[in-house]
Image (cartoon, rainbow, N blue to C red):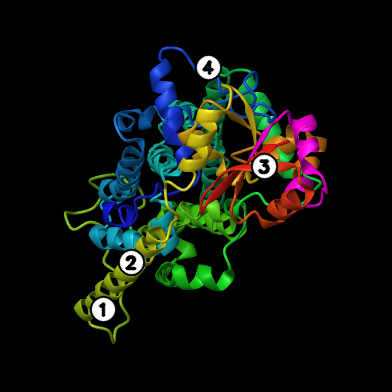
Amino acid sequence: MAWIQFASPAIVGNDAYYHIRWSRILRDSLPHLPAFKWLPLTVLRPQLFVDQHFLFHVALMPFTFGDLRQGAKLAAPLFSAIAMTSIFGLLVFYRIRYRWLWLLALAASSEPFLYRMSMTRAPSLSLLLLAVGVYLILERRWVSLAVLTFVFVWLYNMFPLIVAFAFLYAVTVWLSKNRLDLAALYATSIGAALGLAINPYFPKDLLLIFHHVHMLLAETVTMDVGSEWYPYDTWELLTHNAALFALCFAALLAFDFRKRSRDRRPLFFLLLSAMFLLMSLRWRRFLEYWPPFAILFAAFTFGADDPDGAVGAHDSQGAAPIEWPRWIPARFGMAVLVFALGVAGVVNAAGARAEIRDLRDPFAMRGASAWLADHTPDGSLVFNTDWVEFPELFYYDQRNVYATGLDPRYLFDAEPDLWKVYDRINEGQEQHPGPLIRQRFGAEYVVARSDSTDFLNAAKASGDFDTVYSDEYASVLRIH
């Protein structure tokens, strides 16, 4: 993961610039929580701000000494390695045979997985909690499961995933034993409720959840919400995850539905991997979860002879070996499988490294940010024409505040009419955007990427602006 990560000097993941800078601000303010003042027009305005990644930012604190960029790049491979080790830990605990082969499969099977696990973001640590959660569910340790869910709420706003795990476990028990077992669902629900109530941001955290649900279900306009919320191209998804799809197909062929009453673990992992595959087909941000649980499904399917699933139930050799067709010698089949996974691993790791190598210059917004920090009054609102640029602007310049950032729906949900004005300005649909920006947003300066051609053309034609700073990446304009 470090080899992939350091293909470029850039921090991987657009929001990662925000995460590492906010972690530094949080560390400097301890034991008090700092006010978040940088998006005053959105649902993240100071009086409503909730740190949805609080424990993730705490975990980043050791990496905020010295160069923040290097710290973020060191944290990402460490967190991802810990996450993958937690998946491997399940194979070790349940003594799945060929577990090193399954670890190779995890590292080799998906280029998008390797790339997304290289981002300095919370999903890597959430994968760790999900792996521990699976263990606690299978071992029926309900108090510990409730505590883990509590921690998950504080770590990352994707904590409903562990509740979904508990629900799918109840479905698994019902399908395998024909009885209702809601203990895991009760434990995770109690842990989530306590995590939301006993929270440094209570009750604002409940309000932010409402905003998220409202943004997803009640959105009435079309907007670019970033690639995270769009699916992969179907062919791209298939080709970049070919090894994983092949393993899943082989596991489905080997899966014996008649044995589900003896060992419900393969069925449980089948349901989990199916859930994440469906989510990944809709939103690419969930692709970091599908490969690990698809590998677990395959591993537990090929080693599913133990009805109890307890350590010590197997002999020293672990679960039953893979059953090759009679015409394939076992050692030859294993050699071919290892070779194929090795080739896939090299190809996918090289692909992920190449994608990171092509990332934009990490200092792209430094020039514009430095000019704004040096030439504007403290606390000035800057109209940023692209919400995607907020993390880098915030990373380099904390003196100014910005019109929107992190997600365009944050502005839309707080001020729908203002967002429509913002969108028209950026699309170049306003003949005189300068006075409108000053009146509606209270901004005197605009920062625009060099490729914001619609806005820049309209701004030039209007005569409302002076260009006070420009480089190959961005320009700063001052309204007359």
**Residue 135 place in picture, x, y as percent:** 38, 41
Residue topped by disc 3: 466
Question: Is tag 3's residue or tag 4's residue first in the polypeptide sequence?
Answer: 4
Asked whether the beta carbons under mark 2 and mark 4 sit within 8 Å of each other, the answer is no
Mark 4 lies on a secondary structure that is loop
Q: Which of the two discs, 3 and 4, sits closer to the camera?
A: 3
Q: Which residue is painted at 50% across and 46% down in the image?
A: 14
Residue topped by disc 4: 200
**Magenta residue span:** 423-446
Q: Is residue 123 visible?
A: yes
Residue topped by disc 1: 336
Asked whether the beta carbons under mark 1 and mark 4 sit within 8 Å of each other, the answer is no
Mark 3–mark 1 Cα distance, whole angstroms, equals 65 Å
- Badge 1 local density, few (<14 within 10 Å), some, or many (20+)? few
Mark 3 lies on a secondary structure that is strand
- Badge 4 local density, few (<14 within 10 Å), some, or many (20+)? some
**Residue 142 place in picture, x, y as percent:** 44, 30
Residue topped by disc 2: 350
Q: Is residue 142 visible?
A: no
**Residue 300 place in picture, x, y as percent:** 36, 57
Residue 387 is tagged as: none
Mark 2 lies on a secondary structure that is helix
Which amino acid type corresponds to the residue marked 2 in the rendered image?
A: Ala
Question: Which quadrant of the view contains residue 67?
Answer: top left
Question: Which quadrant of the view contains residue 16?
Answer: top left
Q: Which of the two discs, 2 and 1, sits closer to the camera?
A: 2
Judge left or right: residue 462 versus residue 449. right
Which amino acid type corresponds to the residue marked 1 in the rendered image?
A: Val
Asked if the magenta segment contains residue 239, the reply would be no
Mark 2–mark 4 Cα distance, whole angstroms, equals 42 Å
- Badge 2 local density, few (<14 within 10 Å), some, or many (20+)? some
Q: Which residue is painted at 53% across and 16% down in the image?
A: 198
